[in-house]
Image (tube, grey):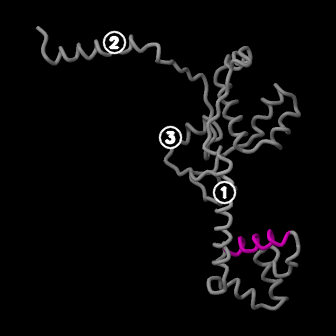
Amino acid sequence: MVSAHDDRRANTKRVQRSYLKGNNHSMKRVGIFGWGVVAPKSPNIESFEHNLDHATSWLTPHAGFGPSNFLVGRPEFDFSVYKPWLDKRFGTRRFSQLNEKMGNMAKYAMGAFIQALGQNTGLESVLQELETKAHIYVGTGLGDFPLQYEKVLIYHKAQKRWNRFWCRKIHHPELAAYIQASAAEKHHILETAGAPQDPGSTDPENVDFDDITEDWYAFWVNRS
């Protein structure tokens, strides 16, 4: 005797077998033979695994886009760790070339890839045998360069307005006191605070005037 519950279970299994059999051509098997990671406080898989077992924050202060491209924390990474691996396979000059010409994103990818190869001793030789049949796919959300350019300019202009606003006399007593000080007092204040060059002492026609001005406001806004 088969109950209604057992009958439904049997029908479900038959449907599953039928589906798998009829759609087997559309199903693909994916094998993961190695993986690497570059993350905040985690330059490799071992440290990443260790950090997962501890309830600590991986966040770091955000210093603005450019210096800080990762909102969740700055990746801990040292490209020189991979120098012996590169030297052994490509000669001693390749590391210097990559280190000088590649950006951090490319270095992160290379580091993670080398980590992945190290997890399976046979993987590297297989990839070498495959030659051009072995493909590398890189997915990134940082690929829309025109959009990046536009957003960087918007951010840069907004940051300049922000810095100037908070460096007004009414908002910044310390800077206001500096502006009212004598030449000797100003020199002492600059040395004591470790401030950059005062744009007021620079010719506006100087090619570096804009950079000097930005550095000036960027310094004082952090003391407002």
Mark 2–mark 3 Cα distance, whole angstroms, equals 40 Å
Residue 83 versus residue 165: which sits nearer the camera?
A: 165
Give the residues drawn in magenta, as a range.
208-221
The reply, left or right, for residue 22 in relation to residue 202 is: left
Residue matched to label 3: 53
Q: Residues within 10 Å of mark 2 (few under 14, many from 20)?
A: few
Give amino acid for label 2. Arg
The reply, left or right, for residue 159 in relation to residue 57 is: right
Give amino acid for label 3. Asp
Label tally = 3
**In the picture, which quadrant includes the C terminus?**
bottom right
**In the picture, which quadrant includes the N terminus?**
top left
Looking at the image, do the residues carrying marks 3 and 1 touch, with CB atoms under 8 Å apart?
no
Please name the predominant secondary structure of the magenta segment in the image.
helix
From the top left corner, tell me how far across and down residue 132 is, in percent: 73, 19
Q: Is residue 219 magenta?
A: yes
Residue at 75 percent of width and 70 percent of height: 214
Residue matched to label 1: 150
Q: Is residue 180 magenta?
A: no
Report helix, strand or loop for mark 3: loop
118 in relation to 199, above or below? above
Give amino acid for label 1. Glu
Tell me which label, 3 or 1, sits earlier in the chain.
Answer: 3
Looking at the image, do the residues carrying marks 2 and 1 touch, with CB atoms under 8 Å apart?
no
Quarter of the image where one finds residue 42: top right
Mark 3–mark 1 Cα distance, whole angstroms, equals 41 Å
Tell me which label, 2 or 1, sits earlier in the chain.
Answer: 2
Residue matched to label 2: 17
